[in-house]
Image (cartoon, grey):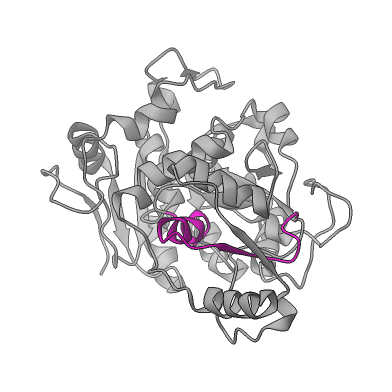
Amino acid sequence: MAKLVVLQQRQPSFSPFASSLSDFNGVRLHNKLIQYRRKAWQAKGTLHVKASSAKKILIMGGTRFIGIFLSRLLVKEGHQVTLFTRGKAPITQQLPGESNQDFADFSSKILHLKGDRKDFEFVKTSLAAEGFDVVYDINGREAVEVEPILDALPKLEQYIYCSSAGVYLKSDLLPHFETDAVDPKSRHKGKLETESLLEARDVNWTSIRPVYIYGPLNYNPVEEWFFHRLKAGRPIPIPNSGVQITQLGHVKDLARAFIQVLGNQKAIKQVFNISGDKYVTFDGLARACAKAAGFPEPEIIHYNPKEFDFGKKKSFPFRDQHFFASIEKAKSELGWKPEFSLVDGLADSYKFDFGRGTFRKEADFTTDDMILGKSLVLQS
């Protein structure tokens, strides 16, 4: 039976993520002043929290990517944070650039509730027994997974949901705004249904719709796909013209946005797109990755995907279309803005992840070789 436990403070063991790490928080999360409109917070150097502002917070997930950065910010702000996971991954791991002291402090304060969110009866009983003020749902995909959480916490103050900009209906009119039509047949339709459920249940909810997310520990092969090819000195194969426009947002900026909506009256029953300030072409992204990581400008090869049968393999990590969203609502309503430019953010990702020899997926150049093989035949 799962139980709530405080992880004991311990010395960090060796891992590929361990390092001296004042840089991890310092680069973008400490040295830059984070502005908050909520009166409970003060942003002069060190963050201070009034005791009455501290919340009992549950994060559904929290041991991968977004949740790792979000949980640290919440703990630093004085909240009691519990991660609900299946316990298959370590609850804490020292992050690249994180100091031993910061890691030990986080490890001593984070709580863990072990269970499967698809075990609805367990979710109801365990959450009802604990009681939480706020839920951050980082890994929810279907509305049916959210209902037992709402049933268990009738006095919930806020439900903050990680949705996706992928819910928008494909359009010739861009960028996407929060009021744009959505696609009920999208592969993210479960997230749309969850937003509808939250509205129907009349809870205080906020939904965040990121576009493409990047940064250290990214489990999706976004920037990593480019870094593998740059490191190997290979050409970068990009579908069609390469002028397709897309948008990326850094995970640390996303984590700050999740913080900004907490207890914010302007976030009640609202949707916010979150991503970077600038849009970028596919070709431009390849060049930005090279610049950020210190590689020479890459050779770019364009190809027509319709001329190839890649089977189940994915030849490129982005939608082959224009795809970007306006973040003006978050900037004007929340006082949030991205701190990372695209090149700076890619440099941060490379420095604290791929550049240290860590990545999620091994390089696979199978589809590249198919593309390059045909390209050489056409050129001969």
Relative horizontal placement of residue 92, taking residue 40 as reference (left or right): left
Q: Is residue 228 above or below residue 311?
A: above
Q: Position of residue 165 (x, y in %)?
A: 69, 54
Q: Nearer the viewer, residue 109 or 168?
A: 168
Q: Quadrant of the C terminus?
A: bottom right
Residue at 43 percent across and 60 percent down: it is 228
Q: Is residue 235 magenta?
A: yes
Quadrant of the image occupied by residue 370: bottom right
Relative horizontal placement of residue 176, taking residue 331 as reference (left or right): right
Q: Quadrant of the N terminus?
A: bottom left
Q: Position of residue 147 (x, y in %)?
A: 57, 64
Instruction: Residue lying at the far right in this picture: please name it.
Output: 172
Q: Position of residue 80 (x, y in %)?
A: 34, 39
Q: Is residue 374 above or below residue 217?
A: below
Q: Nearer the viewer, residue 232 or 181?
A: 232
Q: Position of residue 126 (x, y in %)?
A: 37, 61
Q: Is residue 225 above or below residue 245?
A: below
Residue at 19 percent across and 49 percent down: it is 7
Instruction: Tell me the magenta residue range.
Output: 218-243
Relative horizontal placement of residue 272, taking residue 254 as reference (left or right): right
Residue at 75 percent across and 41 percent down: it is 326
* Residue 70 appears in the picture as rendered: no
Q: Is residue 322 magenta?
A: no
Relative horizontal placement of residue 77, taking residue 203 as reference (left or right): left
